[in-house]
């Protein structure tokens, strides 16, 4: 046994729960998102990543050994997010999108829409999409950094 309470031969029970779970990661190329997506890949999740720019995201995903289906869309278009979630029926969604982390992102309106309004529209889209499968865990994980605010 290791200090985390699981044998060194397998994944901790919490992480093994992600095996085959349909997971959506919004912001998979960001500083937090790439590590979450990498961990989900490593633990066998059925991964779907949502990015702003698929061609530029491909390099980051490859560098971090992230394997999943890539979707390029504007998350501020609530109908696009809703349509995607309805089609995927994810078990869990990780919202790791944030505006303002990049020094070039300084528009207050965009910051408010992305960091303030988007989480609410995401929750509405998830409610419209219904619950995915038999997943018994948390359905939404929303994480950000102080740089967003």
Image: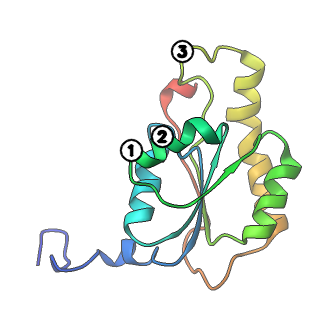
Judging by the rendered image, the residue that carries numbered circle 2 is 59
Task: Tell me which residue sits at (50%, 38%) in the image.
Answer: 30
Mark 2 Cα shell of 10 Å, populated few (<14), some (14-19), many (≥20): few
The answer for how far apart the CA atoms under marks 1 and 2 are is 6 Å
Give the x, y percent position of residue 87: 79, 69
- Observer-side mark, 3 or 2, equals 2
What's the mark number on residue 77?
Answer: none
What's the mark number on residue 103?
Answer: 3
Q: Helix or strand or loop: what does disc 1 sit on? A: helix
Q: Helix or strand or loop: what does disc 2 sit on? A: helix
Residue 55's image quarter? top right
- Relative height, residue 113 to residue 37 (above, below): above
Going from N to C along the chain, the mark reached first, 1 or 3, is: 1
Q: Quadrant of the N terminus?
A: bottom left
Task: Tell me which residue sits at (67%, 34%) in the image.
Answer: 115
Give the x, y percent position of residue 126: 76, 62
The answer for how far apart the CA atoms under marks 1 and 3 are is 23 Å
């Amino acid at each position: 046994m290791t200090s985390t309470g699981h044998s060194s031969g397998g994944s901790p029970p919490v992480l093994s729960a992600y095996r085959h779970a349909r997971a959506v990661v919004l912001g998979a190329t960001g500083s937090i998102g790439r590590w979450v997506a990498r961990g989900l890949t490593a633990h066998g999740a059925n991964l779907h990543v949502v990015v702003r720019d698929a061609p530029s995201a491909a390099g980051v995903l490859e560098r971090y050994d992230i394997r999943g289906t890539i979707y390029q869309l504007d998350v501020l278009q609530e109908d696009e997010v809703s349509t995607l979630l309805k089609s995927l029926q994810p078990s869990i969604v990780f919202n790791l999108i944030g505006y303002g982390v990049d020094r070039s992102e300084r528009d207050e309106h965009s910051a408010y829409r992305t960091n303030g309004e988007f989480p609410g529209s995401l929750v509405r889209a998830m409610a419209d999409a219904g619950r995915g499968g038999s997943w018994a865990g948390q359905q939404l994980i929303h994480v950000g950094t102080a740089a967003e605010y």
